[in-house]
Amino acid sequence: MENTIETTPVKYAPKMNSETRLYSDQHIFDFTKGVICPCTAGKTFNKKSSFQNHQKTKRHLSWIQNLNDNATNFYLQTLEQENVIKSQQLLLTKLDIQLKQKATIIEYYENKYLHNNIVSGEEADLLNFVD
């Protein structure tokens, strides 16, 4: 059996002109992993010439036009997503703190149970404690 590493194709993203705030196609130089264009789901371009031909299609040109028409909406959507990410990070931090606190409490009771069994001469069996 041949050992090969699967590579994930690069997802194509057009460039935005900082002056005009419009998207336009950019040149891709590395096709070793393949390139996937968001306007054509499931199609991987492995050659520069096939991708350049794709960039001339109506589907691709209308996708670029749609990006330009909705640039403001994409910006607002990005701001909303940043807020969601921040709130999720705060929630994850809060849950992580709660988890660590509960782990500390569990460790305390496990140690107390073991100590009590050792002091009373009983066999310390954590498996019975958990049940």
Image (spheres, rainbow, N blue to C red):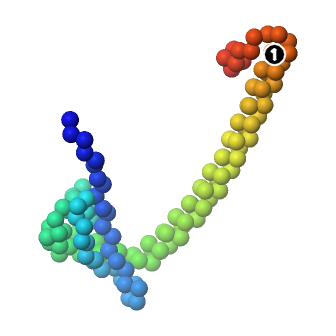
Residue 57 in sight here: no
Camera-side residue of 69 and 101: 101
**Quarter containing the C terminus:** top right
Q: Where residue 80 appears, x then y in whole percent?
A: 54, 67
What amino acid is labelled 1 in the image? Ile
Q: Is residue 92 above or below residue 26?
A: above
Question: SS for tag 1?
Answer: helix
Residue 83 placed where, x, y %?
A: 58, 65
Quarter of the view holding residue 119: top right
Residue beneath the point at 40% across and 89% down? 19
List x then y, in percent, for residue 39: 27, 65
Residue extending farthest top: 122
User: Is 22 placed left or right of 39 in the picture?
Assistant: right
Q: Residues within 10 Å of mark 1 (few under 14, many from 20)?
A: few
Q: Is residue 57 above or below residue 1?
A: below
Q: How many marks?
A: 1
Query: Does residue 43 lie above or below 108 as drawn?
Result: below
- Determine the image quadrant of residue 48: bottom left
- Residue denoted by label 1: 118
Q: Is residue 97 above or below residue 26?
A: above
